[in-house]
Amino acid sequence: MSTTDPSPTRAREGRRLVVTNTPGIYRRKRADGSLGGYVVIYRAAGRQRKESARTLAEARAPVPPVTPTATAASSTLPRA
């Protein structure tokens, strides 16, 4: 692999998340230094999830609940 070869990893190196005053909501910083949209990080069904939003108001909107899949729901039920 040559050093001039653009790779997806190198393209993502400049993207960072900048902390906001709202817990769990971050601004996306692009590779060129400008600020993009927002990223919401939360937990649902025992997993960490990430969603994007264009505005802070959209990012603050309640996240719809995640319904567990049939296999996950049946595995948590006590055995008879």
Image (tube, grey):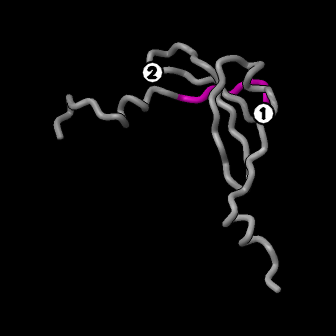
Residue numbers of the magenta segment:
16-23
- Residue 61 position, x and y percent, is 80, 27
The 10 Å Cα crowd at callout 2, few under 14, some 14 to 19, many 20 or more, is some
Q: Position of residue 8 (x, y in %)?
A: 35, 34
Residue nearest the viewer, comparing 34 with 70: 70
Q: Given the image, on which type of amino acid does mark 1 rest?
A: Pro
Does residue 24 sit above or below 76 in this rendering?
above
Residue at 50 percent across and 20 percent down: it is 30
| Disc 2 + disc 1, Cβ < 8 Å | no
- Outermost residue on the bottom side: it is 80
Residue at x 66% of width, y 24% of height: 53
* Residue type at the position of mark 2: Ala
Q: Residue reaching furthest top?
A: 34
Which residue, as the protein is rendered here, is positioned at the far front?
Answer: 70
Q: Residues within 10 Å of mark 1 (few under 14, many from 20)?
A: few
Q: Picture coordinates of residue 59 (x, y %)? A: 73, 25
Answer whether residue 61 is magenta in the image.
no
Residue designated by label 2 = 31
Query: Above or below — where is 5 with respect to 57?
Result: below
**Residue 50 horizontal side relative to residue 56, left or right:** left
Q: Dot 2 lies on which element?
A: loop
Badge 1 is on which residue?
23
Position of residue 47 measured from the top left corner of the image (x, y, whole percent): 68, 53
Of residue 66 and residue 55, the one placed in the foreground of this image is: 66
Is residue 18 located in the magenta-colored stretch of the structure? Answer: yes
- Going from N to C along the chain, the mark reached first, 2 or 1, is 1
In the picture shown, does residue 18 fall above or below 7? above
Query: Quick check: 77 left or right of 2?
Result: right
Residue at 20% x, 33% y: name it: 3
The secondary structure type at the circle numbered 1 is loop
Q: Quadrant of the N terminus?
A: top left
Please tell me in which quadrant of the rendered image residue 28 appears.
top right
